[in-house]
Amino acid sequence: MALSESEQTLRAWRPTIEAFAASAVALAIGVFDTTGRAQYLNPGMTYLLGGEDDAANLAARLALPAFDDLQRGSGPGAVYRGLLTFGGGALPYRSVRGEVHRADNRLLLIAEHDVQELDRVNHELMHVNQEITNLQRELARHRAELVQLNELKNEFMGIAAHDLRSPLSVIQGFASLLTRRPDMPPEERTELLELISESVQDMLGMLSNLLNISEIEAGKLRLRPAPVNVYEYMDRIVRLNRPLAEQKEIALVLDLPPGLPPTVYDPDRIQQVLNNLLSNAFKFSHPGTAVTLRVMQTPGGALEFSVIDQGQGIKPDELDKLFKPFQRTSTRSTAGEHSSGLGLAICKRIVELSGGRIGVESEYGTGSRFYFVLPVPDAPG
């Protein structure tokens, strides 16, 4: 089979190409006629000329040396040896080491790519690829969060519809009874109105919890830390919660050792946590028992808040349910108090947002200790 004209030319220049390639790291080869039209381009030369569409005429892409200067001279050696500068139009200028040979009205260009430039391009491509990967991961994370929030919203709606139905039914029933019996004795009327008021309070508490957990899950809860004197603060917590304890004939005990340091946290949100833990302790304890509110300093300097009851305790296999939304254990309140299953989940989020951790220790049939640990900021030096 006869060789093509380009193949014959390349074969004739093979020793020259091989000699240059021996010292080149990234080789670009092109064969052009005397008008500058490309007859052969390897991928390296195509890259230098900006792509095959732009490589039709070397005269338009070779800035240095001038294309016309390469038309003069021929022979066994190179007609030019040194830096070849390509560029023009939309193609950025770049210079590479190269040689130009001329024979039989053809030009052979051999050039060595700038390895640093190639490395830079490769690094940029790797960076762009990494950015794309990160964006894909971020989109996947946002998609998963949206799915989770949608599931949480559906769960909220289902729980709210179920739990609000009971107090609404009570209100509707008692209101209807009051309407049908205008001659009802005052003491009975007062009792029904009190039950209606209690049902309304249950509904308001449930809606408040739903709004709190929605706000937290959406990342909209903002803490407002402030300096706190632990002794004054805990005394106020006890005074606010003692009436609830007395309603069930439960003793509320405050245990504070001397020397507790002042600290900084959001007093309203931590009060929300303590009120919830105390309310649960009263709810699941029998009359005649005691609930202890204790604050201790840990060996690491943090403050540990504990609510200790003498109630029914929690089964070991149910402990992992406690701090999850809408999860309830088999332990029942001692006076029929309502529970939304959201309080402890809210406590957990608030404590974690405050930089702390929350936990529980319980012995079924004996009682429980719910606790959370908050860091104490270093005193300014």
Image: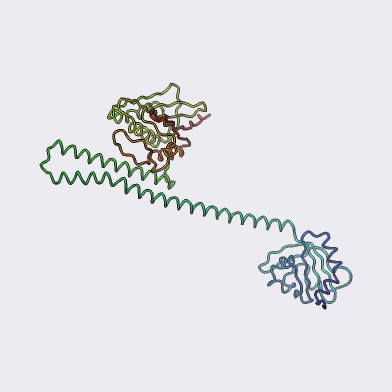
Residue 93 spot, x, y in % from top left: 71, 64
Residue 314 spot, x, y in % from top left: 40, 33
| Residue at image coords 30%, 46% | 164
Drawn side of residue 172 relative to residue 3, left or right: left
Q: Is residue 224 visible?
A: no
| Residue at image coords 13%, 37% | 186
Between 278 and 267, the residue placed more toward the observer is 278
Instruction: Give the quarter of the figure containing the N terminus.
Output: bottom right
Residue 118 spot, x, y in % from top left: 71, 58
Residue 99 spot, x, y in % from top left: 82, 66
Count every numbered label the image shows and give the total: 0
| Residue at image coords 37%, 48% | 156
Query: Which residue is at the far bottom?
Result: 2
Between 332 and 288, the residue placed more toward the observer is 332
Drawn side of residue 196 relative to residue 26, left or right: left
Above or below residue 10? Residue 252 is: above
Residue 322 in which image quadrant: top left
Above or below residue 100? Residue 349 is: above
Residue 244 in which image quadrant: top left
Query: Which residue is at the far left?
Result: 183
Above or below residue 209? Residue 40 is: below
Residue 279 in which image quadrant: top left
Q: Is residue 120 visible?
A: yes
> What colour-coding does the image apply?
rainbow
Query: Which residue is at the far right?
Result: 76
Between 259 and 18, the residue placed more toward the observer is 18
